[in-house]
Every structure is written in C-alpha cells, then in structure tokens.
Image: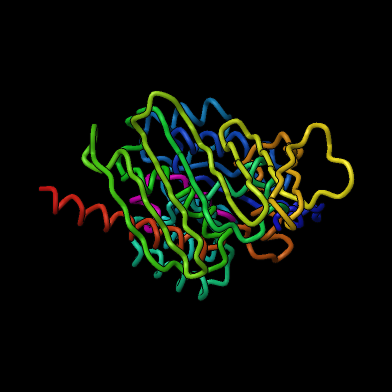
C-alpha cells in the first residue's frame, strides 16, 4: 500500500526536528538530510557531549531543550529511549506537531491509549517506527500473501548492552508481532509464551505462540544472546510457502500449481495419487529493490502529511503491536513466578 505514497508530491518542505541523538537518532539525522521533503531544523539531546559531537558531525543546530526544538518544527521525530516516548509525544501533540515515533510506541498501554486520544484532538499525523514494514524483502512478498495459516519467525541477535533496558519482546520480537498482525486479518484468540533472563534483568530469549480466530498460528522466537544474527520468517498458506530473510533482504516463493501439459524441467512434480492428478512446485525469487527501510519510512511519512494520507504504520498499529507484546510479557511473568 505504501508504494502509492511514494508517488511524486508537491514541493512542500516540512521542518523536522529530531529528539534523541543516540545510535538510531544519528541514523535518522543522516537520512533526513537526504530526503527532499524535509528541512532539518536541528536536534535535541540531553547529553552535552552528544550535543556537541552530533552538531559538529552533521553541521546542524543543537537546541537547548525539547520544547525549543518542538516549537521550531512542523514534524517531531522521537528517537529517544522508550521510557521518554510518551513525555516527548505529549509535548509535541500539545503544540500541534506531526510525530514520527520509534517502536515500541510507548512504555505502557495506558500511555499509548492516551496518545491516541490526544492525537485525535490535535488532528495531526502519527507514524510508528515499525521499520520492517518497509524492508524491501517484505515489500516484495506482499503480493503473494493469501491468508497464511502457519507463521514461523526467528529473530536472533548477538548480545548488545544497548538494548537491554527493555525485554527482548519489546526490543526485537515486536518487529515480527507487527508484521504478523498486518498480514493476518483476524483477532487474536490465545497467547502463550516462555523465556528466561540470561545476562540481563529481563528476558533475553523468548518463544511465543499466537493463535488467531481464523485458525492461523504464529510461532515466534526472539533472542539477543545468539552467536549469530538471524531475521527470518516463514509463511505457510494454501498451495504456497513464502520465506523472507529480513537481514539479507531476500524473498523466496514456493508455489503449488495444477500441472497442465509438460512440467518445467526445473520444477518438482508431485503425483497426488489416483484421480487426483499431478501438481507442480515452482520456485521464484521476486525482485527485491535496493532500498533503505528507515529512509523509506521517513519519506512516506512526509508524503502522508503533505498529501493528507494515513501513515503506513498508524498509531493504532503501534498500539496493537504493543498490546500483543505486553500480553506476551505478562505470560512470561506468570511463568517466571511458577518457576521461582
């Protein structure tokens, strides 16, 4: 759907300011400087050393407060630690500014609900940074989805202390939760989960099972203590198997079709038995464009504002992903209490 938002817009430039100039914040600053629809007014970070270094590195203005930056911008890009998302977003909304806010949308569901209420009153656009929606491998797979009934996700990462302020569910698994909720058009029926803390105070490895009313089941594994990085998801549906490698940006499609005439010499033919005929398994590699997902999400947000479209990842999407993630975390707490 978001390809439509990439159509050429008018020459309007939106003044944008970045709140938070840590690792991800600096990536946002660098990419915003490459997007024609934005005029970067500057950034704010509470760390004086970071302020000085980033201002010098990118040649931009370091504001002395969040309020000052918000006042100077049309759009506020919130790339702070999650615990500050709500506070920053409320300040921006009360000033009537459009907001791009990194995932997870807020630290609690109550905060997310409050933001939704405030956003309706402010009549502004809000997009949540579920960046995998813009991963070119996922975009290439979208035309092939037809009600998947079993989904398997593995999101494994090497240990990095930078993400341990939150559970691995909010740090990593929430990416796959958002993708699954976007694909499976059915209410969640049941959630179960298990996991454990290994090197931090919150779970570092987690497995969750999400069951939907339509019968679809999703099995998710997330770890931040693996020896190698992996971000793979497999979708199984009637007559098709789709695999997406979010890390390598590759998509593979296996399809089962009625065999008519001679089979392709490179395909596999299955004889289904008497009176059931034969089927042919074909394999294809859809064209995956060489795009930067973060740049894409920031660009489409500008287009949503300029052309008055809904953002690709709405505040409701952000809330729903956080809701499922929080249910998984609650299940983990129950499991932990039983073990102790």
Viewer-nearest residue: 260 or 129: 260
Determine the residue positioned at 81% across, 49% down.
259
Q: Quadrant of residue 156?
A: top left
Residue 72 in percent (x, y) is at 55, 52
Q: Quadrant of residue 254?
A: top right
As drawn, is 340 to the left or to the right of 159?
Answer: left
Residue 25 in percent (x, y) is at 49, 38
Quarter of the image that includes the N terminus: bottom right
Residue closest to the far bottom:
121
Residue 38 in percent (x, y) is at 67, 47
Residue closest to the far left:
340
Viewer-nearest residue: 149 or 187: 149
Residue 320 appears in view = yes
Viewer-nearest residue: 31 or 55: 31
Tell me: residue 199, above or below residue 101.
above
Magenta residues, start to end:
75-87
Residue closest to the far right:
261
Viewer-nearest residue: 113 or 217: 217
Determine the residue positioned at 71% across, 60% down.
306
As drawn, is 57 to the left or to the right of 84?
Answer: right
> Residue 169 lies in magenta, yes or no?
no
Residue closest to the far front:
274
Determine the residue positioned at 28% across, 44% down.
195
Tell me: residue 339, above or below residue 317.
above
């Amino acid at each position: 759907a978001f390809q439509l938002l990439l159509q050429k817009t008018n020459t309007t430039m939106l003044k944008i300011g970045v709140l938070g100039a840590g690792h991800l914040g600096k990536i946002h600053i660098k990419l915003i400087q490459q997007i024609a629809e934005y005029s970067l007014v500057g950034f704010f970070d509470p760390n004086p050393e970071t302020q000085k270094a980033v201002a010098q590195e990118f040649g931009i203005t370091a504001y002395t407060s969040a309020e000052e930056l918000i006042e100077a911008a049309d759009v506020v890009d919130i790339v702070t630690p999650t615990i500050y998302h709500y506070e920053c977003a409320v300040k921006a909304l009360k000033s009537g500014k459009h907001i791009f806010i990194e995932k997870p949308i807020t630290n609690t569901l109550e905060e997310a609900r409050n933001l939704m209420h405030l956003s309706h009153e402010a009549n502004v656009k809000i997009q949540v940074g579920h960046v995998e929606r813009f991963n070119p491998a996922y975009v290439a797979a979208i035309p092939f989805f037809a009600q998947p009934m079993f989904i398997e996700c593995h999101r494994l990462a090497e240990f990095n202390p930078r993400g341990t302020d939150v559970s691995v569910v909010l740090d990593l698994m929430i990416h796959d939760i958002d993708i699954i909720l976007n694909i499976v058009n059915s209410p969640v029926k049941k959630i179960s989960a298990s996991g454990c803390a290994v090197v931090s105070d919150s779970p570092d490895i987690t497995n969750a099972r999400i069951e939907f009313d339509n019968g679809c089941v999703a099995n998710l594994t997330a770890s931040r203590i693996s020896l190698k990085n992996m971000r793979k998801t497999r979708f199984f549906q009637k007559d098709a198997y789709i695999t997406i490698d979010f890390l390598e940006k590759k998509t593979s499609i296996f399809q089962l079709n009625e065999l008519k005439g001679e089979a392709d010499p490179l395909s596999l033919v299955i004889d289904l038995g008497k009176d059931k005929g034969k089927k042919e398994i074909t394999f294809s590699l859809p064209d995956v464009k060489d795009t930067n997902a973060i740049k894409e999400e920031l660009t489409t947000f500008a287009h949503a504002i300029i052309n008055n479209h809904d953002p690709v990842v709405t505040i409701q999407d952000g809330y729903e992903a956080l809701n499922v993630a929080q249910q998984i975390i609650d299940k983990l707490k129950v499991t932990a209490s039983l073990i102790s």
